[in-house]
Each structure stands twice: as C-alpha cells, then as structure tokens.
Image: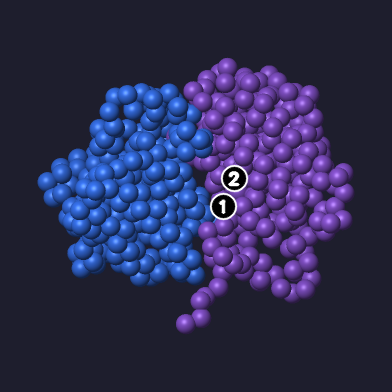
Amino acid sequence: MNRLEGKRVVITGAGSGIGRASAQRMAREGAAVLVVGRSAGNTEETVALVRAEGGRAEAMVADATAEASVEAMVARCVAEFGGLDVFFANAATPGTNTPLLEQSVDEWNDVWRVNILSCFLAVKHAGRHMTQQGSGSIILTSSAASLRANAGAVSYSASKAAVNSLVQTAANAFTGTGVRVNAILPGLVETQMTRKVFEQARERGVEARIGHMTPMKRAGRPEEIAAMAAFLASDDSSFVTGQWYAVDGGVSSTHPHGRIAL
Amino acid sequence: MTTHTTAPVAQRLSGAVCVVTGAARGIGLAIAERFAAEGGRVACFDVGAARLEATVAGLVARGIEARGYVADVGRRDAVADAFDAVARDFGGPVGVLVNNAVWARFQPLEEVDEESAGRMFDVGLKGLIWTTQAAAPQMKRRGGGAIVNLSSTSALQALTHSIAYAAMKAGVLGLTRASAVELSPHGIRVNAIVPGMVGTPASVGKFDEATVTARLAAMPLGRFGEPQEIASVAAFLASDDSRYVQGAEIVADGGWTIATR
C-alpha cells in the first residue's frame, strides 16, 4: 500500500492514541511523518514504533496551541523532509465534567484553546504553505459529539462543532488553490483521552456495555480512525473537501440503538 | 482537469465477490475497475445487454475476473435470480454490493409523468431494497459484508427540474441509515457516497455551457470530479479500512455543497 509515497506529513497529538496509530499507518503507506506531541517520551516512542516497521519519522515536542510552535512545525517538516503535503491537527482535550452551571470561564477557554485554536493555527500555517504550493490536505479531528449532545462535556461538544464549521469555511476560503480541508468525527475510541470511561466500566464489570448505543455495539479502535486519516491524506480523496466524515460505528446515523416494540 | 494517479493500491478486496450495478459505463465501470485492481472479483450488473457485454469483454481482456449479468434492478424477481447466478458462478457468497444503477429524467414539475417518476423510483430507490434483500443472506453466510449506495448532492441542495431525482436520492440516504441499523448485527455495513458534479458525459451534458463555467469557478476544488475519484471512495467503504464506518454519508463533491451560493 503505497498511496502516501513521497508525502510529507505533520501529525499533532501523535504521542498516543489516534495520532500515534495514524503516524504508523501513514508511514506504512510511504509517508515521512513529523510526530508532534507535548511529551518527549511519548513522541519518541511513536517514532520508535514507526522505525521498527522500516518507516520514516521524526519526533518534535511542541504546543499545538501556540502560534510560533505551529509555524515551527511547518518549518521543521519542510527542513526535515523537503516539504509539507498533509497536516493532521489531532491534538485535543476532553475538558472537565463540571456541570454547565458551575463551569468557569477558564475551564471553557482551556477547552476552546486546545480544541479549536489549535485547528485554526494549523489551517492558517499549513494553509499558507500549501496554497503557495498549490496542493495539500489538512485533516482536523472533530468528534461525533459535535453533532449531538450526551457524548461529552458541553465545552467539548461546542468546540468540536466549531471545528466542523472551520472545515467548511477554510475549504471554501481555499477555493481554487488545490488545498483540501476535512474533518474526521470519531465516535467512542479507547485512547488516553477516554481511558477513564473504559477503566470505570471495567471496574464495574460492565465493559461489554461500552458502545452498546452504537449499531455496531462496540467502541472503535485508533487504527480504524487512522485508516480514514490515511484515506483523507491520500489522493484517493482527491475530490473531497469541506467534509465531516463520521467513523463512529453508526452512532450518528441513528437514535440510541434499540428495537421498536411490535 | 488533473490526471488521476495510477499508483499501486493494496489488495484490500482480495478474493471478495463484488456486485456493482450500472457497471457498464461511467462511475459504475470505474468502481468495477478499481475493485478489480484491489483484488475483487467483479459481478457487473446492467440493464443494457449490448453495452454490458462490450464492457465485460474489455475487462476480461485486461485479465480482470469479471462477469456480466443483464438485470433490471427495478424488478425484484430478476434481481433475486441474478444474485443466485452470481453465487453459483463465483462459487461463493457476495461480500460487497455497490448500488450505482439509476434511471433519471429531469423535468419541470408540470411535466413529471407517472411513468418517468415510477421508473426513477423503481430503479433508483426500490431497486436498492431488492438488491440489499438479495445480498444480505449471502453476506450473512460469510459473516458480514459491505454495501455502498450512491446518493447525490441533489439530495442535499436541489437544482430546478429535479423534484423526482432529489426525492429519489434523498430516499437513498434514509434507506442507507435504516439498512445500517437493521443489518449491523449481522456484520453488514451500509454507507452512502454523495457525489457532486462528476464529469461523465451524461452528467455534464445536462447543463448549458454558462452553467458549467459558473459552477467550475465556484467549485472549491476548481474542477469537476472524475469517475475514478468516486471509485476510490467506494473502495474505501467496501474495504476493512472503513470497518467502524456505519450508516455514514460520505460526500465527494469538490466542496460544492459547503457554501451558500
């Protein structure tokens, strides 16, 4: 599978979970990957996993919410690999479970900073490089929680809905430039971000109930999101821009799954 | 228009028996070709015997395992017979179904006649029920499968003279979601592709030159799509790469529907 041969890729939030799985998948398809995260240990571990399979990757510790850092990611990718073809802005935070009426402005702003400011900066700086180049694919991680309530904190859902809007407005702003911008909307996937949910379910012995609301009756795996990211990074999605693609076991296509009593 | 890359692709559909309806030309043919390139064994359905025979002969001449089935998907009995024949001929159950066949007529409201509307719904909507009905038992037998239904951006943002067409293509989305919910327990995934303007002769020919020029200028990707760019989406949805994608609408329209026009 060499759909990404010669592609130069930046992935944020790549020290674990969906970002790590995407680094592995894209490298397997021939991409050179700049693995960005806040932890040196985690990013280096991702790089080691990629290299163990014969892939090409470099680690970079950087803050996805700081403008200078995002500019530095683009510069580093260009310096290291000779260009930038794909930017996967995947860093995110679930926020806190503070009830809506108790939520502080600081808590709210923190979620918005990590989840949407980071995407704006990615679109701005990757977009600047790619529009000049005349091609490129920008991928943002949204969430099935952006479409409906009851799938995460209020601030989380709202910030992810903002990501969806940014995908449309940025794709439209890049009309005629050859730059594509799309979002992936994962459902419940076991990662560092959602680990608590899974651990609590295991403690209570109700692990089998995880994902019972989805038609597929299970949670997703990071590799299953990575497969979509690889599709959006590749020329297989060359006519796709401005889209929100759910990878959620069907949860957004149905009401909480059940059978109508006859 | 860019040239689509012919980079080697993985054998994600290795050995799978794939039914593609409306496969004699256009998007259907591109899907059959792409599936074959990924290792799929292709059962090409079409209502036009002559064009189907020529297409299948061309595929076989290129070393592709393809068979043709002349069938009107609007007829339930004909569909059931064709699926029986596929299982027999390929020596195994169907694993992938792509509902691409369509019969379309674009008419102003006052000219919509019963026969045209009936034919559109028979082929483009009821036909999907018949093929899904025929495919599901075979897919259950092999422990699962993938169904890909072709909708259209007309289902999301309508054009004039497309009342029946838009209704049919919006119907495909409802049918897709409901099929996904009903078939999910059997490991069958059902998803829809929502293509925008794809530069097949049939689709571009529907519009006058001024409309085509205006649309190209407003299109975020600056061009119409190619059938191969829908086929690559279909291959993703048919393969295990999309194994957690269920009941989804995958729009591939060059960005046409994202903006207010």
Residue at point 74%, 74% (across, down): A205
Residue A29 is situated, as x and y percent measured from the top left of the image, at: 54, 37
Label 2 is found on which chain of the structure?
A: A
Residue at point 66%, 71% (across, down): A209
Q: Residues within 10 Å of mark 2 (few under 14, many from 20)?
A: many
Q: Amino acid at mark 2?
A: Ile
Would you say the residues marked 2 and 1 are in contact, meaning their CB atoms lie under 8 Å apart? yes
What tint does the image give chain A? purple
- Give the quarter of the image for residue A78: top right
Label 1 is found on which chain of the structure?
A: A
Q: Amino acid at mark 1?
A: Val
Q: Secondary structure at mark 1?
A: strand
Q: Residues within 10 Å of mark 1 (few under 14, many from 20)?
A: many
Q: Which residue is mark 1?
A: A247
Residue B140 is situated, as x and y percent measured from the top left of the image, at: 40, 69
Chain identifier, colour blue: B
Identify whether B213 is placed above or below A41. Answer: above
